[in-house]
Image: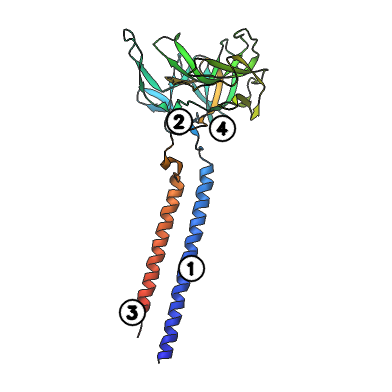
């Protein structure tokens, strides 16, 4: 009898071990599969340096105004009528926004108060994530419908004002298309691309492509970058363009200054899609932000924890069943 009982008990122990191994194998499979799926999904979202991303696919009511949302949730753009607002049209990807050379989209950074007789302007922060001091990338898909007779046919421009007049507005950073008007003694080709920054050294710095690079009625991807080491660069459809400086230098020193507002499409006859602004040298990340696992991996951790808990409970249940079933 003892030998029979001993043999039966060994078989039950082997069953417990097999069940435990099975649950651990299933748990490991779920861990790896969930993390893999989370990493794949993460590749389809905005990257860690994206500050704002406007798909320009929709217009939503927001109180007394209409907005085109920022996918990052920080800097929704308000439609500016002059006299009509920008219109949704077919875009490069889904919908896009068409500007007529007068209207625009506006994103506040700071509200300016304290007009004269106040000796100095007073700024109330609204959303300062667009104040990028060091290294920046601005990019968009554009389809230029015509060249407006203006120095800057703006795609994106961040500016700062010191009072309520349009004369006292300083361009801080931006990307624009040129209409062929001479600037600072330089001949500027019609259809040239421009990028610029204003830094705390008091200098305005602008580069333009040396030739026509933006065609009419055709979708092109344009980008402007500023690096502290290599300076300012312009790209069309991913290819870097030859440029020259018409103000300041191509590799300016100093930090880009703060601003009060950002505009899309001002003074431009253009269809704009998929506008993205990235901070290539983020400074404000905390330790928690640097190791943030994100929502997908958080779900993975929760799922894995539940699986391990279930495996432990099953193992304990089998053990208790074995103990209670002993003769």
> What element does badge 2 sit on?
loop
* Coloration of the structure image: rainbow
Label 3 and label 1: CA atoms lie apart by 23 Å
Given residues 121 and 314, the one toward you in this image is 121
Report which quarter residue 247 is drawn in.
top right
Q: Residue furthest left?
A: 117
Q: Position of residue 306 (x, y in %)?
A: 40, 58
Label 2 and label 3: CA atoms lie apart by 62 Å
At 48% from the left edge and 73% from the top edge, which residue is drawn? 18
Say left or right for 255 vs 207: left
Q: Nearer the viewer, mark 1 or mark 4?
A: 1
Q: Position of residue 110 (x, y in %)?
A: 39, 21
Q: Are marks 2 and 3 in contact (CB under 8 Å)?
A: no
Quadrant placement of the N terminus: bottom left
Q: Check disc 4 and report the residue beneath it.
A: 93
Q: Check disc 3 and report the residue beneath it.
A: 324
Label 1 and label 2: CA atoms lie apart by 46 Å
- Of labels 3 and 1, earlier in sequence is 1
Given residues 317 and 210, the one toward you in this image is 210
Q: Nearer the viewer, mark 2 or mark 3?
A: 3
> What element does badge 4 sit on?
loop
Q: How many marks?
A: 4
Q: Are marks 1 and 4 in contact (CB under 8 Å)?
A: no
At 43% from the left edge and 89% from the top edge, which residue is drawn? 4
- Of labels 1 and 2, earlier in sequence is 1
Q: Position of residue 272 (x, y in %)?
A: 54, 24
Q: Residue 22 bears which disc, if any?
A: 1
Say left or right for 289 vs 251: left
Q: Check disc 2 and report the residue beneath it.
A: 70
> What element does badge 3 sit on?
helix
- Of labels 2 and 4, earlier in sequence is 2
Q: Residues within 10 Å of mark 2 (few under 14, many from 20)?
A: some
């Amino acid at each position: 009898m003892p030998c029979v009982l001993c043999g039966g008990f060994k078989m039950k122990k082997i069953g417990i071990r097999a069940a435990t191994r099975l649950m651990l194998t299933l748990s490991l499979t779920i861990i790896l599969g969930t993390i893999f799926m989370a990493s794949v999904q993460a590749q389809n979202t905005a990257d860690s340096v994206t500050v704002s991303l406007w798909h320009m696919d929709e217009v939503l009511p927001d109180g007394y105004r209409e907005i085109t949302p920022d996918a990052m949730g920080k800097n929704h753009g308000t439609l500016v009528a002059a006299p009509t607002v920008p219109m949704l049209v077919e875009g490069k990807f889904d919908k896009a926004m068409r500007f007529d050379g007068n209207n625009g989209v506006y994103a506040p950074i700071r509200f300016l108060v304290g007009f004269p007789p106040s000796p100095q302007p007073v700024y109330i922060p609204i959303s300062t994530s667009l104040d990028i001091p060091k290294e920046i990338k601005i990019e968009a898909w554009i389809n230029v419908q015509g060249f407006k007779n203006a120095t800057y046919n703006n795609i994106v421009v961040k500016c700062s004002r010191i009072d309520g007049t349009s004369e006292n507005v300083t361009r801080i950073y931006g990307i624009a298309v040129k209409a062929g008007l001479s600037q600072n003694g330089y001949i500027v080709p019609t259809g040239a691309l421009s990028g610029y920054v204003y830094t705390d050294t008091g200098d305005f710095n602008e580069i333009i492509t040396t030739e026509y690079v933006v065609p009419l009625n055709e979708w092109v991807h344009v980008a402007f970058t500023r690096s502290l080491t290599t300076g300012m660069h312009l790209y069309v459809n991913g290819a870097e363009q030859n440029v020259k400086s018409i103000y300041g230098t191509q590799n300016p020193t100093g930090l880009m200054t703060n601003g009060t507002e950002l505009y899309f499409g001002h003074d431009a006859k253009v269809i704009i899609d998929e506008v993205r602004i990235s901070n290539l040298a983020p400074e404000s990340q905390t330790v928690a932000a640097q190791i943030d696992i994100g929502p997908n991996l958080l779900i993975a951790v929760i799922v894995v924890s539940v699986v391990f808990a279930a495996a432990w409970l099953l193992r304990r249940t089998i053990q208790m069943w074995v103990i209670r079933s002993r003769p």
